[in-house]
């Protein structure tokens, strides 16, 4: 059977009895087995997948079309980054510390996706504790780029991006603390979505940096990104930072935009000059400007904007993030679950050390407090830009995918790969990474759209219109 | 502001605070790497933050309360709570000895 590329194709196929959910699972598991060397998965939940699939087939047999109204994601295969707790299914965070950990409860997002009729395929590989931009920090071996096995797939949600790219699932979840969804999406040629901080519950997801962690997902269609977001978002009374919000949102003009309104003509997209400075690969920069032309040809206004504190984002991010990491990883003592602290890998130790240093007596004001103040300046930059534009268009990573091992020996170089993604996390704003074209070496390129807090609808509309123009 | 120059003693102190046991080789490696990374952070001194409030979170929310009720369906049973530990005794987690002097 041909693997469906979207939720609509999957559900239409199931309804028309072109294939059953069990056959769908057969097909995905076969693809996973054929791509074992990609190391996209840590755990494959085949038994569970067949249980879910049988339920789906029964619901369709019993209720027909009505089953899809009751369960909006019925029959959709999902895999979760191995940071998401799944009751009864091993969850490792990509670290040997949790090699034997079987969660006693599920994350809110896992539960919400279950309740909407999805089929759980497995748990995807990631940099241990979500620390990394290349996938090379996983204790279970590095995931490979789907277009060239000697190149990295990006990180830290590496396996999720590759699983979607290679049809090893239809949808995959991820977390984005400093670019960990947008960057692997960009390196693997799929769509990656980082919601507004506070739109989706973090409950039951192994915490990296609590003021930055955003819970999002990967797909091949913007429509599917949106459908999954409609399920995952919203308050759960367990994560106090989550807020319900109403669509449609209003544009700067005060005009409401809605799903049905395809007209994007009065939208203005800002291009931040600080995202095109020296050090940004020429091919990457030119391709983003080509994408800008596509938007311009659709009748969208382009405007240059300035985000003057962009260059400081990486320092602010690595201070705030490592501080929060050192605090969140303090709980791993090997007493209630998991192994003791000897099992931490090198990158986790490095970040714990860095975070403990910037928080320690004598350095707190100089580093941590200073970083929180510059964070305010970065947020102010975005606030000012969003008074003039509805969305921002920028590259995701300064370079196309790099080779395995190229940056592994130099942590500072690796950290600098995050320079174009971390500011969105510091400001808590949403981002949508879209694939567009390939490099001369045949590796995926793309761009990200950033919007103000809770402006997901604008990003989805722009993403959909762009995809219509380019495919 | 203190500029770089992290000593091995400092690295050992930080490791102790973080409850990490590092080998001599790791301590040397982390000293060099932390020095480079912290040195990079010093660029923040270029930014005037004299009158800037720090940001610790971006939601704009504060003091989100809920009523103090338990939902028994969402509580782990004792058996579930202990299911992932390697050593328990009489329904308790067994922990290493911390105070060993009278």
Image: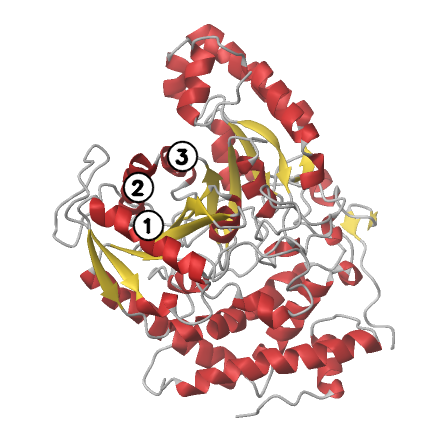
Disc 2 + disc 1, Cβ < 8 Å? yes
Q: CA distance from mark 3 to mark 2?
A: 11 Å
Q: Which of marks 2 and 3 precedes in the sequence?
A: 3
**Above-or-below relation of A134 to A64:** below
Looking at the image, the residue that sits furthest to the bottom is B1
In this picture, residue A160 sits left or right of residue A222:
right
Instruction: Say the numbered circle drawn on residue A221.
Output: 3
Q: Which of marks 3 and 1 precedes in the sequence?
A: 3
Disc 2: host chain:
A
Asked if residue B68 shows in the view, the reply is: no
Label 1, residues with CA under 10 Å away: few <14, some 14-19, many ≥20? many
In this picture, residue A35 sits left or right of residue A246:
right
Disc 3: host chain:
A
The lab-note entry on whether marks 2 and 1 share a chain reads yes
SS at badge 1: helix
Q: CA distance from mark 2 to mark 1?
A: 8 Å
Asked if residue A413 shows in the view, the reply is: yes
Looking at the image, the residue that sits furthest to the front is A440
Disc 3 + disc 2, Cβ < 8 Å? no
Q: Image quadrant of residue A275?
A: bottom left
Looking at the image, the residue that sits furthest to the right is B101
In this picture, residue A102 sits left or right of residue B45:
right
The image shows residue A292 at horizontal and vertical percentages of 29, 52
Instruction: Say the numbered circle drawn on residue A291.
Output: 1
The lab-note entry on whether marks 1 and 3 share a chain reads yes
Q: Which residue is mark 2?
A: A466
SS at badge 2: helix
**Above-or-below relation of B61 to A51:** below
Disc 1: host chain:
A
The image shows residue A78 at horizontal and vertical percentages of 54, 32
Q: CA distance from mark 1 to mark 3?
A: 17 Å
């Amino acid at each position: 059977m041909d693997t469906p590329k979207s939720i609509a194709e999957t559900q239409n196929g199931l309804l028309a009895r072109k294939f059953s959910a069990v056959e769908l699972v057969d097909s995905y598991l076969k693809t996973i087995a054929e791509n074992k060397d990609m190391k996209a998965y840590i755990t494959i939940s085949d038994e569970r997948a067949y249980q879910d699939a049988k339920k789906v087939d029964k619901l369709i047999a019993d209720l027909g079309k009505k089953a899809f109204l009751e369960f909006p994601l019925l029959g959709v295969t999902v895999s979760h980054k191995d940071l998401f707790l799944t009751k009864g299914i091993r969850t490792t965070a990509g670290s040997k510390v949790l090699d034997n950990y079987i969660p006693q409860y599920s994350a809110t997002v896992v539960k919400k996706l279950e309740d909407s009729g999805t089929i759980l395929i497995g748990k995807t590989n990631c940099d241990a504790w979500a620390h990394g931009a290349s996938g090379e920090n996983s204790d279970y071996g590095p995931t490979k780029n789907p277009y060239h096995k000697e190149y990295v797939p990006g990180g830290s949600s590496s396996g999720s991006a590759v699983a979607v790219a290679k049809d090893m699932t239809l949808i995959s979840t991820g977390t984005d603390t400093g670019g960990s969804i947008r960057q692997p999406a960009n390196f693997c040629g799929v769509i990656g979505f980082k919601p507004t901080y506070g739109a989706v519950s973090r409950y039951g997801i192994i915490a990296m940096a609590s003021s930055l962690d955003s819970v999002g997902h990967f797909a091949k269609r913007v429509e599917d990104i949106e459908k999954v977001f409609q399920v995952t978002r919203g308050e759960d009374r367990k994560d106090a930072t989550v807020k319900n919000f109403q669509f449609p949102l209003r544009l700067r003009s005060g005009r409401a935009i809605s799903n049905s309104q395809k007209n994007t003509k009065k939208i203005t997209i800002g291009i931040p000059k600080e995202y095109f400075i020296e050090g940004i690969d020429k091919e990457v920069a030119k391709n983003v400007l080509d994408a800008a032309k596509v938007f311009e040809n659709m009748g969208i206004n382009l405007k240059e904007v300035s985000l003057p504190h962009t260059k400081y984002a990486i320092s602010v991010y690595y201070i705030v993030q490592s501080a929060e990491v050192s605090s969140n990883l303090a709980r791993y003592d090997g007493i209630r679950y998991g192994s003791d602290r000897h099992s931490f890998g090198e990158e986790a130790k490095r970040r714990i050390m860095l975070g403990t240093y910037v928080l320690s007596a004598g350095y707190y004001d100089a580093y941590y407090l200073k970083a929180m103040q510059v964070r305010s300046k970065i947020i102010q930059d975005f606030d000012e830009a969003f008074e003039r534009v509805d969305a921002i268009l920028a590259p995701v990573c300064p370079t196309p995918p790099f080779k395995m091992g190229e940056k592994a020996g130099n942590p500072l170089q690796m950290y600098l790969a995050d320079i174009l993604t971390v500011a969105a996390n510091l400001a808590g704003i949403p981002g949508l990474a879209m694939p567009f074209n390939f490099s001369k070496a045949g590796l995926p390129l793309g761009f990200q759209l950033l919007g103000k807090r809770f402006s997901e609808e604008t990003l989805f509309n722009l993403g959909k219109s762009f995809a219509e123009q380019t495919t | 502001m203190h500029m770089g120059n992290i000593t091995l003693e400092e690295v050992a102190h930080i490791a102790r605070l973080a409850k990490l046991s590092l080998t001599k080789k790791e301590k040397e490696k982390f000293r060099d790497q932390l020095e480079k990374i912290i040195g990079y952070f010093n660029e923040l001194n270029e930014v005037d933050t004299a009158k800037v409030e720090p940001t610790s979170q971006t939601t704009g929310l504060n003091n989100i309360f809920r009523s103090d009720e338990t939902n028994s369906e969402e509580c782990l049973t004792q058996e579930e709570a202990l299911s992932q530990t390697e050593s328990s005794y009489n329904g308790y987690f067994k922990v290493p000895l911390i105070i060993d002097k009278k």
